[in-house]
């Protein structure tokens, strides 16, 4: 079903409604302009924060500004329902300009708080109960104080932030806006090679007869990237240089690498990152074993990268409508008991989830919200088991947000990205268990096993591979070694081989792979991808706790929000990412799943 085909009554149930935030675009623009009043009040406090009453006033105004920005940003998600809507493109631009202007006006705040000093502010916080919730925030702030520049320099950096971010915008323009459309002959007709068709061909074509078709499809799909490989390499080098420059400006003694500076925000030590890479390389034979199972299953003499996505089994042609999917999710998550289910029901209220696809709607799914604004979810429901899993994943985010908002006051309700994927992947583990135990045939079990194994490999091993690649790329630039398309292609292949890709055959040994630019996180969020691997590790441990009846660890984690350093929050929930053995349960589980797949496919 398409979104545009819904009746009025169905739209109330299954479509977003942000009218409680702003009645219409005109009210939104008024809300945007009202930000100036809050910013103006903050500007009037310049030079006065050393007085306690003014400092308290600053905190209240800052909270008000943050909430208003969150509401304005939430409303703009409407633009994802029709990405061709020029009016929303205009609103997004207005929002970006306003944020830049406000940041410039307020660039004096951090240097002024730094000048007050930690002793004074610690005393204010301890002597005034209403400031207690700012204790962790201020602790983090003064941990970073040596990297805060003078008011003049912070203002200068703020003024050039737009131009410094332009290189990332250029990536989006090249890869998405200026993408050359290509077509391919498939099922006796010429078709545009979309992402959906690309995946269909790689997953569902004949294993032996269509090997060449899959290779050609992949070449065509990546041809646009290959054509722009030199530009993309230059853009990536530029993005890395921006990060390195920022680190050098804030750390003039150059005691930190760009990776170490990035990890500071979450108080994560370099050994945590290094251990993750060691574990990924140590256990990559599991990936190789999985590829070998598929190669044998399909009786292929050569097993190419384009064969790795082939489906080993088909599900019965069973469709799951939204309500059926919701009921399954509620049943699965009922093990988490009343408090979790109360928040789950809030996350499912009408107007909070936009379920159905439409012509110009953004693809995929996400959850957004928090900081006093109720979470929302974008979906593209397609009546499959995958849709159930996706909704369960996104609801994990929403419930995390709701529980953090309920139990933590601002600003401790805001949890960092490194914790964000934990709650969502806990739900994935639980949903897999339910579906696998309910499976009525080996065919169904094989399908579910393959899907779950590939999720773990993709979220754990693949993200560690990406994490090592971007670290090595940054190290090259830090050593002032130039990056180019071939250097990056060779580096990517060399690292991919460490994580199991070395057992795959190549259609042309001399042809370089330029698939790395498809990983948008490299361009938009450097040193982000490792967090996926740590998150699925944590979620599996919490899932094991749930199976053993220890549900409190998950709830304790969800209620903590961002009230402490991420690794400390995890320790309180029984997970220590500083212990290299923390990864063993997930790795052992993957080995068991692969063994089960071997048995079902009669390869053991």
Image (spheres, helix red, strand yellow):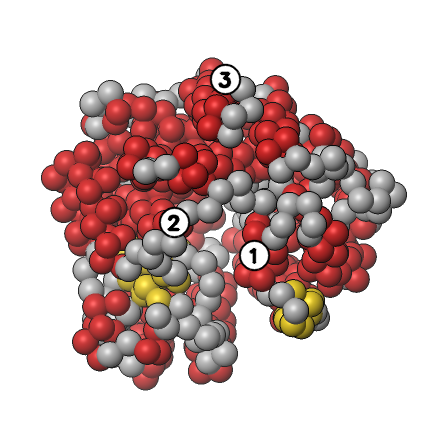
Please give the residue where the numbered disc 1 appears in the rendered image: 200
Residue 239 is left or right of residue 548, and the answer is right
Q: What's the CA distance linking mark 3 and mark 2?
A: 41 Å
Residue 347 appears left or right of 504: left
Residue 345 lies, in percent from the top left, at 17, 52
Q: Nearer the viewer, mark 3 or mark 2?
A: 2
Q: Which residue is mark 2?
A: 316
Q: Determine the residue positioned at 24% across, 20% down.
A: 548
For marks 1 and 2, give the CA distance: 17 Å
Dot 3, crowdedness within 10 Å: few (<14), some or many (≥20)? some
Q: Is residue 302 left or right of residue 403?
A: right
Q: Residue at x 17, y 39 (%)?
A: 334
Image quadrant where one finds the C terminus: top right
Residue 177 found in image quarter: bottom right
Residue 554's place in the image compared with 5, above or below, is above
Q: Earlier in the sequence, mark 1 or mark 3?
A: 1
Query: How many neighbours does mark 1 have within 10 angstroms: few (below 14), some (14-19), or many (20 or more)?
Result: some
Chain-order first, disc 1 or disc 2 = 1
The residue pinned by badge 3 equals 580
The x and y percentages for residue 213 are 71, 55
Residue at the (38%, 28%) spot, across then down: 540
SS type, badge 3? helix
Tell me how far mark 1 sits from mark 3, CA to CA. 38 Å
């Amino acid at each position: 079903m398409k979104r545009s085909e819904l009746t009025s009554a169905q739209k109330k149930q299954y479509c977003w409604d942000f009218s409680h935030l702003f009645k219409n675009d005109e009210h939104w623009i008024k809300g945007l302009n009202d930000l100036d009043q809050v910013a103006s009040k903050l500007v009037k406090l310049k030079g006065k924060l050393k007085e306690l009453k003014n400092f308290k006033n600053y905190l209240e105004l800052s909270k008000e500004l943050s909430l208003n920005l969150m509401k304005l940003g939430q409303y703009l998600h409407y633009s994802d329902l029709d990405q061709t809507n020029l009016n929303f493109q205009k609103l997004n631009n207005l929002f970006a300009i306003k944020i830049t202007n406000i940041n410039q006006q307020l660039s004096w705040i951090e240097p002024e708080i730094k000048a007050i000093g930690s002793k004074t502010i610690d005393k204010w916080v301890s002597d005034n109960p209403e400031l207690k919730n700012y204790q962790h925030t201020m602790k983090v702030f003064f941990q970073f104080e040596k990297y805060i520049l003078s008011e003049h320099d912070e203002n200068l950096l703020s003024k050039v932030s737009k131009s410094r971010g332009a290189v990332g915008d250029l990536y989006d323009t090249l890869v998405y806006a200026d993408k050359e459309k290509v077509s391919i002959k498939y099922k006796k007709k010429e078709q545009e090679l979309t992402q959906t068709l690309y995946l269909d061909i790689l997953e569902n074509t004949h294993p032996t007869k269509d090997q060449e078709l899959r290779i050609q499809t992949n070449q065509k799909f990546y041809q646009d990237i290959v054509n722009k490989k030199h530009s993309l390499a230059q853009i990536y080098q530029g993005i890395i240089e921006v990060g390195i420059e920022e680190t050098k400006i804030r750390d003039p003694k150059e005691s930190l690498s760009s990776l170490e500076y990035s990890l500071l925000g979450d108080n994560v030590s370099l050994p945590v990152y290094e251990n993750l890479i060691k574990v990924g390389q140590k256990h990559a034979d599991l990936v190789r074993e999985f590829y070998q199972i598929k190669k044998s299953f399909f009786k292929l003499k050569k097993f190419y990268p384009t064969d790795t996505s082939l489906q080993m089994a088909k599900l019965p042609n069973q469709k799951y409508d939204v309500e059926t999917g919701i009921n399954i999710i509620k049943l699965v998550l009922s093990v988490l008991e009343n408090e979790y289910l109360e928040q789950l029901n809030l996350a499912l209220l009408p107007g909070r989830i936009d379920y159905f696809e439409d012509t110009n709607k953004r693809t995929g799914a996400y959850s957004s919200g928090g900081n006093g604004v109720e979470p929302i979810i974008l979906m593209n429901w397609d009546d499959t088991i995958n849709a159930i899993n996706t909704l369960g994943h996104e609801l994990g985010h929403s419930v995390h947000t709701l529980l953090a908002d309920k139990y933590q006051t601002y600003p401790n309700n805001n949890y960092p990205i490194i914790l964000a994927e934990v709650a969502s992947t806990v739900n994935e583990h639980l949903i897999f268990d339910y579906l696998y135990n309910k499976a009525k045939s080996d065919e169904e079990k094989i399908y579910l096993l393959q899907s779950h194994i590939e999720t773990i490999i993709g979220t754990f091993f693949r993200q560690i591979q990406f994490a090592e690649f971007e670290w090595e790329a940054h190290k090259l630039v830090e050593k002032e070694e130039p990056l180019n398309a071939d250097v990056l292609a060779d580096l990517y292949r060399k690292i991919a081989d460490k994580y199991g890709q070395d057992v795959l055959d190549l259609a042309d040994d001399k042809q370089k792979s330029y698939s790395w630019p498809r990983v948008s996180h490299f361009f938009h969020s450097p040193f982000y991808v490792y967090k996926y691997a740590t998150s699925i590790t944590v979620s599996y441990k919490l899932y094991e706790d749930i199976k053993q009846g220890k549900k409190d660890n998950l709830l304790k984690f969800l209620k903590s929000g961002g009230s402490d350093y991420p690794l400390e929050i995890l320790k309180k929930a029984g997970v220590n990412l500083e212990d290299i053995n923390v990864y063993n349960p997930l790795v052992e589980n993957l080995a068991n799943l692969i063994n089960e797949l071997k048995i079902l496919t009669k390869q053991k």
